[in-house]
Every structure is written in C-alpha cells, then in structure tokens.
Image (tube, rainbow, N blue to C red):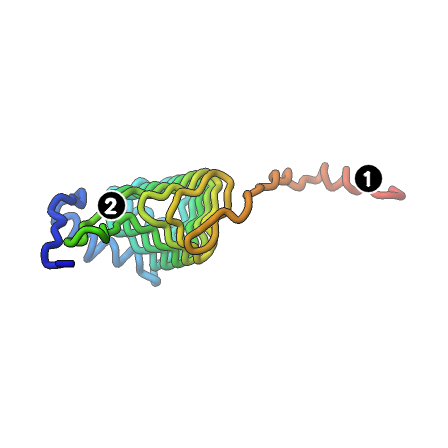
Amino acid sequence: MDLSSFDNSWYSPGRNLLIRTLWYFAGAPLVRCAFLPWSSIRRFLLRCFGAKVGRGVVLQHSVRVKYPWHLSIGDFSWIGENVWIDNLVEVRIGAHVCVSQGAYLCTGNHDWSDPSFGLQVRPIALEDGSWVGAHALICPGVTIARCGVAAAGSVITKSVPAFEIHSGNPARLVKKRVIRQASPPLTAQRLQESAEALPGT
C-alpha cells in the first residue's frame, strides 16, 4: 500500500469552497448544538444549505450531516441523537422513517485492492416507513425498502427488502415485519357501543 499516492481529485463535493466553509463553521455546529431543542431551527438551517426537508421532521440534537445539499428527508421522519449522515453523495430518507440514536449512514468506502486505497462513493436510500435501529451501520449503496428494518447494532452491507427485518454482522433476514391495522379513534359512540355489548346492559 502507498497512501501517499491517494488521489480523490475526481470527486466533487457539490458546492464551492465558500458554501462548504460556511456549513462547516456555522451551519453544522448549530445543527449539532444540544442547547437548541427545536427541530424547526434545524430544519431551517438544513434547508438554507440545500437539503430537502419535509413537514414535521424531528431532528434531535447532535445530528451530524456531511453535506446537506446531498440530503432529502420526507414528511414526519425522525432523526435521533448522534446520528451521523456521512453523505458524500445522495442520502434519501423517505416519509415516516425512523433513524434511531447513534446510527451511521456511510456513503464512502475505499478499494482495499487498490494500492492507492481509492475512494468509492455510493448513495443510500431509506424508503417510506423504514426503521434504522440504534447504532446500526448502513453501508454504501444500501437501500432499506418500504417498511424494512435494520435492527439495532446491525451492519447492513446489502439492501433490505420491503417488510423484512435484518439483524447481525453482517445482517441477515430474521423475520418479516407485520404492521397491525390502526385502531379507529375512540369516540363517544364507540364507548357507548362497547358498553351496550357488555353482559347485563
């Protein structure tokens, strides 16, 4: 190996040096700041730097984002404390997605067969309703399909099909995800119907 010959000049971060510097010294520290409890401020900052962030997105403190202009988050998704979105290229997070505490979304890797240890980048997609458990690692090029689950602490090296739960290192299928039907809202009429159905009423 000869790391002195490493060359990533082909890679473009997607914004000029001024924007990247502003993000590094101003935007990113505010998004990570534990003294700002409001998701609305984090959503605003990310949008200012080019991220696409939907309605009702919850962004906890200590979230790290490499390049917000490579990030999209759908409506009502949750991003937990200490999540690291290391997005050298696109990370697409759908709607109603939960990314739990300490998860790492990694879009960059190195070619271990290359004596120069060449950089490799591939996008990540978390589709609607999926869940990345606490401290899970999502590797470059992975898609977690609709309502798929990456269990806590797992290393996800291959894409997870829809409605499957994968766990372990490397992660494997452990079971199918079955989502119960939502219960109808509890109303006065339903309460009365329940009471009338009781014996002796």
Q: Is residue 128 left or right of residue 72?
A: right
Disc with the residue nearer the chain's start (1 vs 2)? 2
Q: Is residue 38 visible?
A: no
**For the point 47% across and 52% down, which residue is it?**
167
Residue 189 pos. (x, y %) = 72, 37
Above or below: residue 133 compared with residue 176? below
For the residue pair 76 and 9, the one nearer the viewer reads as: 9
Above or below: residue 6 compared with residue 56? below
For the residue pair 117 and 148, the one nearer the viewer reads as: 117
Toward the bottom, the furthest residue is: 35
Type of amino acid under label 1:
Ala
Q: Is residue 54 left or right of residue 14?
A: right
- List the residue tagged with mark 2: 121
Type of amino acid under label 2:
Val
Q: Residue 101 occupies which quadrant of the picture?
A: bottom left
- On-image quarter of the C terminus: top right
- List the residue tagged with mark 1: 197
Q: Nearer the viewer, mark 1 or mark 2?
A: 2
Q: Is residue 81 left or right of residue 2?
A: right
